Amino acid sequence: MRYSLVYLLMLLPVLCCPAKLAAQHKDVQQNEQFWFGYMTSTRVSERFSIWNDFHYIPEGFSVVRTGLTTHFPNRIDVTAGYAHVWLPVGGELRRREHRPWAQVVIPTPLGGNFALQHRLRWDLRYRQRTAAGEITDGYTFNHRVRIQTVLRRNFPALTLGGVLPSLVVSNELLMNLGEEATAPFDQNRISLMAATRHKGLMLQAGYMNRYVQAATPGRFTSNHTLVVWLFHTIDWRRQDTQP
């Protein structure tokens, strides 16, 4: 428990990032959103898994992503793949984005009923160019670094019918790099969610604030988001042992 409190204190400066940004910039538009996500991880061997996920925000972005995960000792996972994204431009117009990506996920043992996880993701973003709210020829390109920390508290004493409840607090900072990046800061995502896990399924729902840099420098959008994510873990290795 002592180590859990230490890690939580280490997270506080990062978790407070959106509040600090909001205090520094006055031109902030408030918005409400709903975010649905479905993520699958299919274990095909001791070493490899196939990752797929789909995300949809009405009047926002949509993402279809796939990747191959390599499992290393100490539960460290490295994934690389491709994502196709539809981004809002204005009104009902959407522009496409081709996004090769890679990430490393590192769990940190805390003991007890706490779990801490760090994720570093790298996005290569090829987005259709726009002018005056219309799609034009060619693509812009920039890198984006994403640093995420997730702290989970399980409640095994409240398990009912094999369903394990938990609380999850997380923060993710997204930063832009490259000559065509309009601003270093892209967005910050902080969330507090409740989760239930049963065998290979986990439902996670709660509140997320997405504090996003708008297209116009100095303007931001604070998205108050209701999140519903379903995680599905599939293990095909069991089929190898069947007669």
Image (cartoon, helix red, strand yellow):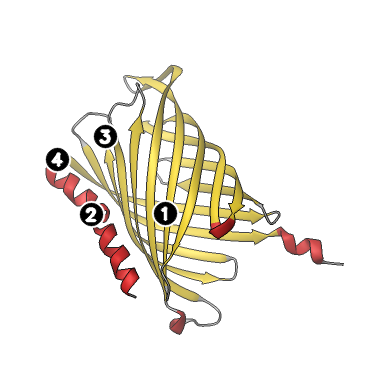
**Nearer to us: label 3 or label 2:** 2
- Residue 117: x, y in percent? 43, 58
Query: Residue 162: percent from the left, percent from the top?
Result: 55, 79
Label 4 to label 2: alpha-carbon separation: 18 Å
For numbered disc 4, what is the local secondary structure?
A: loop
Q: Earlier in the sequence, mark 4 or mark 2?
A: 2
Q: Which mark is residue 45?
A: none
Look at mark 4 in the image and give the residue it sits on.
25
Identify the image quadrant of the N terminus. Answer: bottom left
Gap in angstroms between the C-alphas marked 3 and 1: 27 Å
In the image, 58 versus 5, the foreground residue is 5
**Secondary structure type for disc 1:** strand
Name which residue type carries label 4. Answer: His
Label ID, residue 13:
2
Mark 3: secondary structure: loop
Residue in the picture at 13% in, 42% down: 24
